[in-house]
Amino acid sequence: MKKLIIVSSDTPHVYNYLSLIEGYFDEVLLISNRRNPEYKGRVEVMDFSLRNPFARIFTPRKIRNVIKAFAPDVIHVHQANSYAHYTFKAARGSNAKKVLTAWGSDILLLPKVNESMKRLVSDNIRSAHAITADASFVAKVIMQLVPEYNREVLVANFGISITPETRLKEKIIYSNRLHKPLYRIDKILGAFERFAGTPVGKDWKLVIAATGDQTESLQQQAMKSELRDRIEFAGWVDKKTNAEWYAKAAVFVSVPESDATSISLLEAMAFGCVPVVSDLPANREWIQNGVNGIIADNLDIDFITPALSLDQDKVRIVNTGLITEHGTKEANRRKFLQLYDRLLK
């Protein structure tokens, strides 16, 4: 009987991952910061705050007790932050194999906060028997942080879970990243204003999905624009509605300041949208500028118009091939299960 403890914050990513590996383990226990009422599996709730002195003392103890009682074969932690710190501290002396999955910001941004955070992330890396990342660039940064870590980092993502529809594209530009400073939605609004003022952009519409702490200010920015009737805030959309927007949109825009492999980018590629993305190493692993999308290195200009110069059919063919080989759930499930097989031999 194979048992897994998976540790993660309560986000859609962890449930996507649990769905991805479903059936491999006989028993799965999730340790998270809160209980999701839609998840029917076994959950233990812990406080993973580093600022709470009580969490620093009691959370590792609680996790240690769960590990002893459950006796997992594998402990798989998502994100090399406090979740890994508390869990790996609690797992000392356990025979379970420890897996760490980096999500991007934990590796790319957290070590830059201060030396203490850099040390915490590095210690988490050293504690893992195996590490996964969803971009080769993130894997390289892991090796730079801890050069003595002599195990190969598995590059795998969680795969896309939606089936692309075939539909005639409309003059729609779609953005569905969170409304937080990291994702720079304000730059998309600015680029759309410039684009819409050109002859080719006069009939186009911008659809901004998702929500966040900047939603109100972004809506105010849009209201001040003369193009407010051509900018739609769709709010938080479900999978079906998200897929419908992908199917209709000719262009997909995602310009975060920092990112690993974005599932929304993979979904947009699968649906035949022309991707316009920020100039990040992880994006360059998927997009070749001027071939299957646009890499926007200057966000203070109209970076949308160049997407219209690409042959949409050719972009779709190239991107469909990339997704089939590297972006589907089937392809990535095989990678993770092979990792577990190797650890459990």
Image (tube, rainbow, N blue to C red):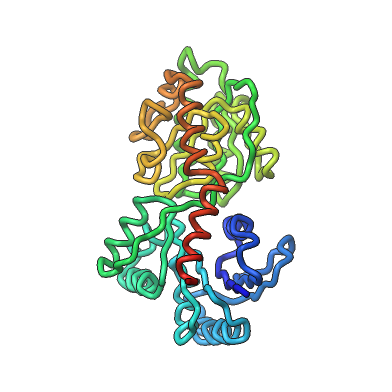
All told, the count of numbered labels is: 0
- Going 52% across and 47% down the picture, which residue do you hit? 331
- Going 44% across and 75% down the picture, which residue do you hit? 85
Where is 256 relative to 138, above or below?
Answer: above
Q: Where is residue 200 in the image (x, y as percent from the top left)?
A: 48, 14
Where is 300 relative to 25, above or below?
Answer: above
Choose between 21 and 178: the one closer to the eye.
21
User: From this viewpoint, which residue is outermost toward the front?
Assistant: 345
Choose between 175 and 250: the one closer to the eye.
250
Where is 81 relative to 196, above or below?
Answer: below
Where is 158 relative to 243, above or below?
Answer: below
Would residue 171 be found to the left or right of residue 302 on screen?
A: right
Q: Position of residue 43 (x, y in %)?
A: 67, 72
Choose between 72 and 66: the one closer to the eye.
72
User: From this viewpoint, which residue is outermost toward the top?
Assistant: 199
Residue 192 visible? The answer is no
Q: Position of residue 150 (x, y in %)?
A: 29, 67
Residue 77 visible? The answer is yes
Would residue 121 be found to the left or right of residue 245 on screen?
A: left
- Place residue 47 in its image quadrant: bottom right
- Going 25% across and 66% down the picture, which residue do you hit? 147
- Place residue 303 in its image quadrant: top left
- Going 29% across and 64% down the picture, which residue do you hit? 145
Quadrant showing the N terminus: bottom right
